Image: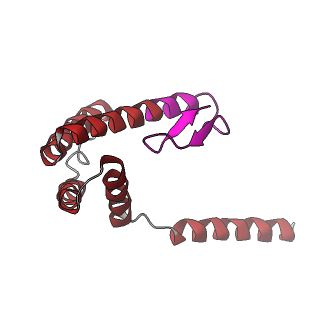
Amino acid sequence: MKTKILLMTGLILLTTATAQAQPFDRQEMLDRRIDRMQQRLNLSDEQANKVADILGKEMEQAPCKSVNDFTARKVCRDQHREAIDRKIAEVLDEKQVEAYRQMKEFRKSRREEMQGRQGQGGFPGGNFSRGGDYGGGQPQ
């Protein structure tokens, strides 16, 4: 009995320590996003810096946090994303804007697919491989 309690306590402590050891780093996430965009859209350093400024400022603002209603928050986030996309499009040339639009469509379809699969008992496992033009999984 004591052994079970000790094992359970150890497991709880280990889980808590692991969760605390991996804090969410917004700057790291932003840097990775800019790196991916720079590679996939062939951004110049100047463009990458401008996009980083846009995304960094928008990330700090988080205007939809105070909206409590789920539907209203979703509408707020969608409007906020559209505003960010317009600002980013001003920095890009026509070819890059089209590639950016395709990247967003691809991510959206993947997100919707993942959300649909969550209700069916989990995420896709071996059915997808990393790769493709936009870094997402492609059906095999």
Residue 114: % across, % down: 52, 34
Q: In the image, what residue occupies the spot 71% across and 66% down?
A: 11
Q: Is residue 5 left or right of residue 29?
A: right
Q: In the image, what residue occupies the spot 85% across and 70% down?
A: 3
Q: Quick one: 20 or 25, which is closer to the camera?
A: 25
Magenta segment includes 112: yes
Quadrant of the rendering where the N terminus is positioned: bottom right
Q: Quick one: 108 or 138, which is closer to the camera?
A: 138
Up/down of 16 relative to 102, above or below: below
- Report the label total: 0
Residue 43: % across, % down: 26, 53
Please name the colour scheme applied to the rendered image.
secondary structure
Residue 26: % across, % down: 34, 62
Q: Quick one: 70 or 46, which is closer to the camera?
A: 46
Give the image quarter of residue 100. top left
Magenta segment includes 34: no
Q: In the image, what residue occupies the spot 20% across and 53% down?
A: 58
Residue 59: % across, % down: 25, 55
Q: In the image, what residue occupies the spot 51% across and 67% down?
A: 22
Q: Magenta span covers which residues?
A: 111-140
Q: Is residue 20 left or right of residue 29?
A: right
Quadrant of the rendering where the C terminus is positioned: top right
Up/down of 117 relative to 46, above or below: above
Give the image quarter of residue 9. bottom right
Give the image quarter of residue 112. top left
